[in-house]
Amino acid sequence: MNIMKKIYNIFLAITVLGIGSCSLDPDPTTFLSDSNFFSTAEETNSAVLHSYQAMTFLDYLRPYMNIPTTASEEAFPKEGEGLNINQFEEWNVDDRNQNLEQFFRLSYVGLNRANTVIEKTKEASYDESLRAKYHGEGLFLRAWHHFMLVRLFGSTPLRVSAVDQLDEVRGIPDASIEEVYTLIQSDLKEAINLLPIQREGGRADRVAAQALLSKVYITMASARQSGSPGYEWVSDADTFYGLASEMASAVINGQSEYTFDPDLLNIYNVAEPQSFNGPEHIFFIPQDRNGLVEGEFSKLSKFFIPADTPTTSFLADGTATHGGFGVYVSELPFLASFDNTDRRKTELIVNELFDENGVSSWTPSGGESAPFSRKYIDPKFIGDNTSTHPYLLRFTDILLIYAEAEGPSAEGYTAVNRVRQRAGLPDLTPGLSITDFRDKIIEERSFELAFEANRLYDLRRTNTVESVLQDIYGKVIVNNPYFYPIPAIERQLNPTN
C-alpha cells in the first residue's frame, strides 16, 4: 500500500492544533492525552504520516504550484481564475491574496504537526533506529516548511514547538530571515545524522535532507553574491557555495539509491507506482489516481492542459491524455527561448493532439489555447483522477546546484553537460568566467525545471526578477518582487507584529 493510502486509511487519534501564525488545524481529531499516544512505533508512524498529509490538502497543493508558475515567465493564469491568482502574473500581490492565505495557513499546520513529532520522539522507548528515523522526518518537514515560508515571505514567525493550548496561539513575533535560516540549517544537519538512506515514495530520507540543505546553501550563497534583498547577513558567498557543493556532492556521489535518469521522458512517467518513484525522485507528494478524494489523487495535469482540448486524445507517440482546465497558459516568449533542438522543447512541449485514428484533433489556436507541458500527463487517468504530482526534489535539480556551486571547474562542466547531453544539446562553451558560467547554469535550470515550481525562487535568489521579468518579458512590477506580504488575516490573529 502506498504512502497516500496509508495516510488516508489511518485513524490518527491525537490532539493537533495547527497554526498559521495563528490559524487552527482544519481537522482536529479525537482527543487523547500524551500519556496514551506515541507510546509505540506504530502510533508514532501514524503521526509522521499525519505530518506529511498537511502537504496533500488542496489549500497547500494548489498554491504551491499556482504562485511560482504564474509569477515567473513560464505561464499566465486563464482569465477569471479565482483566488487572486492573476496578482502573481501582474506582480501586484496584496495581503488579501487567497493563495498566500491558504499556503501560509497550511504551512503552519504542517509545522505544528512536525513539531509534535519532534517533541514526542526525543525520548521514545521503542526501537532506537525507528525513533531516530521518525525524529529526523519531523526535523526535515519543519525545515521544508520554514524554507518555503522564508523564500516567499522573508521575515516570518518561527514555530519550534507544538501548539496544544489555545493560549499559545497568539503573539508570535516575526523572526528575522537570518534566524529562520539558522534553524533550517540546524534541523537539516540533525536530520542528516538521524535518517537512513531508505526510499519510501513520498517520505524524506537522508538524501532528501542533503538535497534540501544543498538548496538552502545555494540560496544563501547566490543571494549574498548577487545582492538579493534580505540576505546581507550571509557572511561570505564563497563559503556557502562550498557548502552547497559539498552537500550536493553527497547526493550525487555519496549514495546509489537515487540517480540521474538518462531517459528524459521516464522522469515524468506516472503510469505505474514504480515509475513515478523512479531514479530521479528524491522527495515528492505522492498522489494516486485510485485515491478517494482530491489530494489523495491529483488534477494537476488538467491545470496545464488547455480547456479547448478534446475529452480524450493522444500525443504523437500514442500516449493517452484528457481534456483540461487550462489554468496555466504557457507564455509563448518563454517557449521560444528554448533551443529548437532541445528535447525538453521538442518532446516535453505538446503542440498537437490526435484522435484514436491518428488524425489531428487539436492544435493551439492562440490566446488561452497554447502549447502545454507534457510533464503532468497520466495515460491511465480515471476521469479527472491522475497520479501526476509536483516534483519537490529531484536528482537533476541537485546536479545543477552542484554545477552552479562548483563553478567552471571540470566537475562543474561535467555536471551541467550531463543534463545538456540528455536534452540533445552540445556541451556548454568551455572557458567561461565564473560569473558567466553560473549565469548559464541558472538559464539551464529554467529549461530543465520548467513548470516545476522552481523558477521564481531562482530569480529571487539571483536578484534578477526585474532584469528578466521586466526587462526581457515586459512585465510591470508594481510591488516588492522579492517577498510577498504576510496575509492580513494572520496579522489580525497575531497582533504582536
Image (spheres, helix red, strand yellow):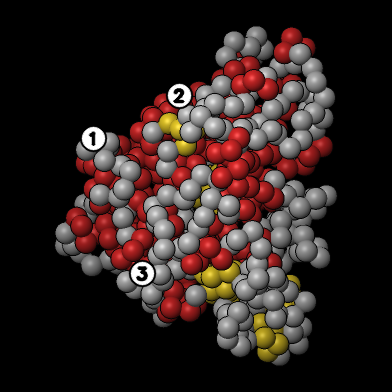
Disc marking residue 435: none
Between residues 58 and 360, which one lies in front from this camera angle? Answer: 58
Q: Is residue 229 left or right of residue 87?
A: left
Q: Which amino acid, by three-letter code, is at mark 1?
A: Ser
Q: Where is residue 181 in the image (x, y as percent from the top left)?
A: 39, 34
Q: Which element is circle 2 on?
A: helix
Question: Residue at coordinates 21% horizontally, 61% vertically from top-left?
Answer: 436
Q: Is mark 3 on a helix, strand or loop?
A: helix
The spot of residue 464 in percent (x, y) is 32, 60
Residue 125 figure quarter:
top right
Q: Is residue 237 left or right of residue 445?
A: left
The residues bearing labels 1 and 3 have C-alpha atoms spaced at a distance of: 30 Å
The three-letter code of the residue at mark 2 reads Glu
| Residue 140, placed above or below residue 273 | above
Label located before the other in sequence (2 or 1): 2
Which residue is found at the position 46% from the left and 55% from the top?
454
Q: Is residue 106 visible?
A: yes
Q: Identify the residue position indicated by label 3 in the image.
A: 470
Q: Point out the frontmost of discs 2 and 3.
A: 3
User: Quick one: label 2 or label 3, which is nearer the N terminus?
Assistant: 2
List the residue tagged with mark 1: 235
Label 3 neighbour load within 10 Å: few <14, some 14-19, many 20+:
some
Relative to 336, residue 443 above or below: above
x%, y% of residue 352? 62, 83
Q: Residue 190 carries which label?
A: 2
Disc 2 from disc 3: Cα separation: 41 Å
**Distance between the alpha carbons at the discs numbered 2 and 1:** 22 Å
Residue 324 position, x and y percent, is: 70, 72
Residue in the image at 48% along x and 29% along y: 173
| Label 1 SS | loop
Badge 1: residue crowd in 10 Å (few <14, some 14–19, many ≥20): few
Q: Identify which residue, 485 or 179, lies in the foreground.
A: 485
